[in-house]
Image: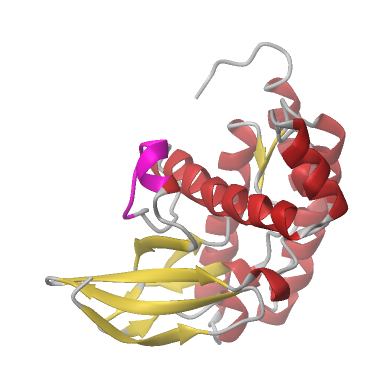
Amino acid sequence: MDELVGQVKGGKEATVYLMRRGDELLAAKVYADLESRSFRNDARYWSGVHIADKRVKRAMRRRSRTGRAAQHGIWVMREYINLWRLHEAGVRVPRPAIGPSAKECAEAGSVVLMEFIGAGDQPAPRLSDVKLDEAEARSALEQSVEILLALARMGLVHGDFSTYNLLWHEEQVVLIDVPQVIDVRSAQREAEELLVRDVESLQTSFRRHRVELPAEELLSQALTLLRARTTGGQDD
């Protein structure tokens, strides 16, 4: 990096900074220190994650410092893996700036470096923070539904899908915050439970924009696509 431009967003679990590399602007998501991280302790987010080392697995279960450090590394790696997987599938997410090799991503430490979504040095707002007219709101909802269904076709569920994790940039919706994405082929029950929650969250958060989501219809369609991945669907 050539320059730290400034802080984009602060939070308990991570802070996002705007960085400059030559003429390119990048977002650096820096995860907080081990003592203040929660690592999304909901067990559903960790279903299907294989931990080969029994000592590490035990440390994670006990939430010792060693276990939390292991969770930290896995969480960062999951975000890189999911960003690459979605980007290469054509889903609108920030393009990761490191990888796609596992070695490169592992060397990133606590930082997830990715494309900066914004105009100039101003970050794109979340859909939860903007005021849209009727046409924009309907377009944003349609795009959001398309993204949710695209994930379902891949056998994936975001796990926290709402306007808080959807950016609005140049009249396009961009999905962010993906380390917790879960694969139905590893944990079907948990994936389906999270999908129900995602559809409900999307419906609730879009009511602020005065557009109604046909939640039951969307859930039925998404579940059909998701379950198809467990019955011989082709790989991505």
Q: Is residue 121 or residue 56 the one in the foreground?
A: 56
- Does residue 35 sit above or below 122 in this rendering? above
In this view of the protein, can residue 144 be seen by the observer? yes
In this view of the protein, can residue 216 be seen by the observer? no
Q: Is residue 232 left or right of residue 111?
A: right
Q: Residue at x 58, y 32 (%)?
A: 154
Q: Residue furthest left?
A: 22
Determine which quarter of the picture holds residue 211.
bottom right
Q: Position of residue 54 (x, y in %)?
A: 77, 32
- Does residue 70 sit above or below 57 in this rendering? below
Image: magenta residue range: 97-105
Q: Is residue 118 left or right of residue 71?
A: left
Q: Position of residue 126 (x, y in %)?
A: 54, 77
Q: Is residue 27 or residue 102 the one in the foreground?
A: 102
Q: Residue furthest top?
A: 232
Q: Quadrant of the N terminus?
A: bottom left
Determine which quarter of the picture holds residue 117.
bottom left
- Does residue 199 sit above or below 106 in this rendering? below
Q: Is residue 85 left or right of residue 196?
A: left
- Does residue 115 sit above or below 96 in this rendering? below
Q: Residue at x 82, y 59 (%)?
A: 200
Q: Is residue 145 magenta?
A: no
Q: Position of residue 25 (x, y in %)?
A: 25, 72
Determine which quarter of the picture holds residue 90.
top left
Q: Position of residue 201 (x, y in %)?
A: 77, 64
Q: Residue at x 58, y 85 (%)?
A: 129
